[in-house]
Image (cartoon, coloured by chain):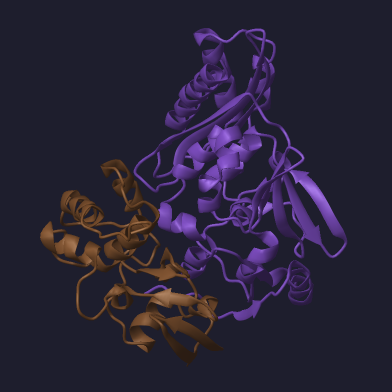
Chain colours: A purple, B brown
Amino acid sequence: MQVPARFEYEVAGSVDEAISLLQRHGPEAQLLAGGHSLIPMMRLRLAVPEVLIDIHNLDDELRYVRDEDGVLKIGALARHRDVLESELIEERYALLGEAETLIADPLVRNMGTVGGSLANGDPGEDLPAALVAIGCEVVVRGPDGERTIAVDELYAGFYETILEPSEIVTEARVSWVPDASSYVKVKRRTGDYAAAAIGVALNMSGGEIEDVRIGMCGVGSTTLRAREAEELLRGQRPDAELYKRAGEQAAEESDPIEDARGPVPFKQDLVKVLVGRALETAVERAA
Amino acid sequence: MRMQVNVNGELREADVEPRLLLVHFIRDHLGLTGTHWGCDTSNCGACTVHLDGEPVKSCTVLAVRTDGHEVTTIEGIWSGTELTPVQEGFHQEHGLQCGFCTPGMIMTGTEFLERNPNPTEREIREAISGNLCRCTGYENIVKAIQWAANNTVREEVGA
């Protein structure tokens, strides 16, 4: 039987209260949202927080998926299921729906939250990679007010964000509506983390790739953005040769480690192939 | 910590450690052993219960998290006289062998059919993808849920 170590338990009644609890308890305190990453880690004693600040009662403040003047706003406590069931997202961001159906399983998606997925800093999480591809900004609130951070600048390392100890993720915000997008993933079995996964979003103009962003999951110590592959693609007319070159470039930018999901060269090959597939699908969808 | 939770329509009070997981609270404190405790790693789904109407894995929820909320376990879906359509489906289609995964399958299947009363086979398979069965190869579980979908009497609008 796996039992978490003892901790002190607090329930926050508002975002502001969560912030003051974080301030009071210091860096050994952790926020608990859906808990489907944190609780397993606590049971394995990989995480041993002294204080848990439970924010599940903040649904009124933080659980929403909505459009505001063309900007998609996803509250930090929106569940994966809410993202999957949102018509707004289905209409604008095909890759988010594709990524969500591949995240864990339906029961986990009933509990797991968007904010938790972002703040956890696990490079194997699908959602941050998909959000990198659509240029998401993460809204965080702390004792000194609110700031926004581009999701591809959120991570400092493996399970490490640039957030201050008393800051809380409140929202994911996306203002770019790409012409098309795609998310592809290779995993060992249903519900597993990715051996590698790629999210692509792009705009086409006159048969050329006008703008493109590529997010990579599971192939580095953080969620990655393939900036040089994006650069190589901009202004180019898509064909099989271009997809191949972009895949090779993205594989250069990836930095996978060997684990149970495969050796390094295998994962680099996956990046090459999946970047090509995601691009091809997105280009077809944009037509 | 003192907590109050509505379990199967009954208000239960308890004083528990914050680290107590919901599955152990249900089994050891309330004596409701129909909810099974399986893998301990949020994979197998044997511990599935409804939290505020949605199926969740109770091995990955703190018991104190349910303070002020509603939990339904496998014991709570039975009327006391007749099997529910999903339970009857498992009976009719031989949807279990050892029975360990069955409570979780039924909890997941029940909520799924409320949302999607006429599912395709693929949708059923997707819905139960968080519940593992090591005996049946899933074929008869899928048929059992399909049986329930086909044999649920629904109230007709305007009837």
Q: Please indicate whether residue A111 sits to the left or right of residue A170 in the image.
A: left
Q: What residue is at 41 percent from the left and 52 percent from the top?
A: A105
Residue A64 visible in the current orientation: yes
* B147 w.r.t. B46: above or below: above
Percent across and percent down for residue A32 are 60, 67
- Along the line of sight, the residue nearer the viewer: A35 or A106: A106
Quadrant position of residue A116: bottom right
Q: Quadrant of the C terminus of chain B?
A: bottom left
* Nearer-the-camera pick, A24 or A86: A86
The structure residue drawn at horizontal position 61% and vertical position 49%, both measured from the top left corner, is A158
Left or right placement of residue A48 versus residue A177 in this view: left
Residue B86 position, x and y percent, is 24, 62
Residue A237 vs A64, above or below: the answer is: above
Percent coordinates x, y for residue B31 in the rendering? 32, 87
* Residue beneath the point at 55% across and 25% down: A251
Location of the N terminus of chain B (image quadrant):
bottom right
Q: Is residue A255 visible?
A: no
* Residue in front for this viewpoint, A109 or A229: A109
As drawn, B33 above or below A43: below
| A173 shown above or below B14 | above
- Residue pushed farthest right? A144
| Residue A201 found in image quarter | top right
Q: Quadrant of residue A262?
A: top left
Q: What residue is at 40 percent from the left and 41 percent from the top?
A: A261
